[in-house]
Image (cartoon, coloured by chain):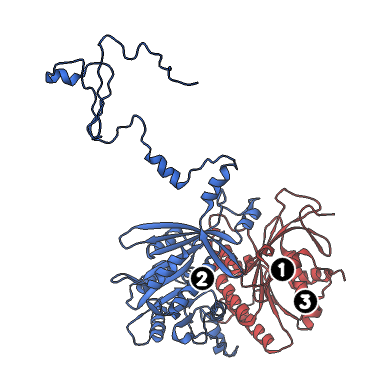
Amino acid sequence: MERTSNLLDEAMAETPNNSVVLIEDCVETSGAFVLHHLMKRSLSPQSSSLLIFVAFAHPFSHYDRILRKLGCNLVMQKDNKRLLFFDMLMPQRSDEVAGKTGLHALYHKIHKAVEMASLSESNKHIVIMIDDISVMEIAANGCTDDVLDFLHYCHTLTTQFGCLLVVLTHEDIYSVADRATILLQMEYLGDVLVKAEPLPTGLATDVHGQLTVLNKSNCNSLGSSRNKMHNFQFRLKESSAEYFYPGSLS
Amino acid sequence: MAETICRSLRDGALEGEHAAALTIKDSITSPFGPVVFNHVLTQLSSFILAGKSQSRGLVLIALTQSPSFYANLFKTNGIEVASSDKWLRVLDCYTDPLGWKDQLAKCGGISNSSTSTAVSSSLCKDVKNLDKLFTLLLELGRGVIGAEKCRFSVAIDSISVMLRHASMVSVAGFLSNLRSHGEISSVFWLLHEDLHESKTSAALEYMSSMLATIEPMTQLANGLIRESTESISFTEQNFDRGKFNTRFKRRNGRVRVVCEEFSVDQSGIKFKSFSSEDAVAQSIVPKLQFNLQLSEKEKNDRAKVVLPFEHQGTGKSIEIYDGRKPLNDEKLGVKPSNAAKVQTNVASGGGEIIYFRDSDDEMPDSDEDPDDDLDI
């Protein structure tokens, strides 16, 4: 296994277990690979965490194919009960209890799963991932307040059960005028902000973009504030990604 | 002026006035509002514990952090949590603000989720109803101060969350009810300015006697962090420090604005007086061997020097002889004489100069070389 510590891992190493990680990307540079990387990391044999994945953007088969290339079999993990996959692509009318919005019902499912997992001692750490907040907004019929309420309740899970919450969103779909609310709300909520952007200098063949990792949690007593901000570039390959500091590409 | 803010909150409501109120305002470019809020909270708590403040208790409305977070915060700042029953109540609007967990528990889905924390807290399951919240708050406050005739303080850890759940009008009503209540000594709250329209933050500022604004050290030219290539260096610069502007409103309407700097590290937040102006002035003057600056004493001495043709403060106009006959003498009918007393300095009291002219046609000092006495 070529699993060596890379810059992304180093940057995320200081992330406390019970924090909120917000991944922001844009049309030119997708941040999905960060999500894949974190998926792989939480499902790796070294860790013993349970992954609860809420898929709004892509079906299970999509993630299965990608993660298999990264060397992680999702079907097997599902059978091992290390992965709980909530497919939100299909409209699930049967689940909707009268008087509840879809997200309310979804929260109940997640909460139950988290509580079950925390009762059984085998899984030490729980990671909740939501693959696209912007699609969740569509599922909530554009009601951002519902999304924010849902995220608040997920945040209570992080403090109550020590979960890690990872969410992905797009920053460029919100216009500057009403840039307010949801994106800012999420930035206030997030402890760690991972931003995927295209290179400021333009397109390049062997550098696909830059990542900025901002660690805002100051309750963390380790590490000086200098280590709290990381900026590096990345190159995506078929089965992995390379991370390097600007100008240090061999 | 973070110290002054904490002192004002400690001193509480003035006689016959509303409770002291503080708005802490931040934005995403410098999101240190919670840090400042926690700082003020711990300062006020230690004042209350020491019995120095007007208020005898504190009710904290927790909307963005759990009660256990605050218990930890107090513990790390050296404030006794075990005996916090006597002065602290937490109104927990964080754990279950909309009653979702309650519903789930009723369905039998989850076990009782109430976790015991070190601080005594009570759960609020309907944040949208501010009237209920207000009565709950008063109950808690009265519980902490007992039957005595004294006051308590209120802290709201994010008014922005409250504004999301309720309308501006009801939040404003809630706050002004708090301020005008006789048992409340001081109120403070945190506002994320960029989540709201400017009229909302203006309305909240009107209701507060103090305003603390947290700003980045440098402003971006276009005001946007997005799509600017300098955003990384901007974030780096403002990552652990910022500007802290405070505005105090006295009851006579006088407004005082003070600027400070702060820096944040693991140990907390540190304030220092704003020094960039001095730094700029010092950096402009290059390092020279000459002394270009004056000391304070030298400045005073310079101010005392009387310049040669300055009127020397007798109140009278001073006549300077230019060789002609004085106009006044003719008017008064005084016989012009060669031996005219030309100039007398009366106020000097002591001596006087008497000058006799030899003749009118002789130009004064005409036969002498004016530079004769120079020793070159």
Quadrant location of residue A156?
bottom right
- At x 64%, y 66%, the residue is A135
**Residue tagged 3:** A43
Quadrant location of residue B249?
bottom left
Near mark 2 (Cα within 10 A), the count class, few <14, some 14-19 or many ≥20, is some
Left or right relative to B315: residue A237: right
Instruction: Please provide percent x and percent y for residue A131.
Output: 68, 69
Give how far apart the Cα atoms at labels 2 and 3 are: 39 Å
Are labels 2 and 3 on one chain? no
Circles 2 and 1: CB distance less than 8 Å?
Answer: no
The chain painted blue is B
**Residue tagged 1:** A12
- At x 37%, y 33%, the residue is B307
Instruction: Please provide percent x and percent y for residue A50.
Output: 73, 80
Under tag 3, what secondary structure? helix
- Mark 3 or mark 1, whichever is nearer to me: 1
- At x 48%, y 43%, the residue is B294
Chain that bears disc 2: B
**Residue tagged 2:** B39
Give how far apart the Cα atoms at labels 2 and 1 are: 27 Å
Can residue A30 be seen from the camera position used here?
yes
Are labels 2 and 1 on one chain? no
User: Closer to the N terminus: mark 3 or mark 1?
Assistant: 1
Instruction: Please provide percent x and percent y for residue B138.
Output: 38, 81
Of the pair A239 and B71, the residue shown nearer to us: B71
Instruction: Please provide percent x and percent y for residue B171.
Output: 41, 70
Chain that bears disc 1: A
Near mark 1 (Cα within 10 A), the count class, few <14, some 14-19 or many ≥20, is some
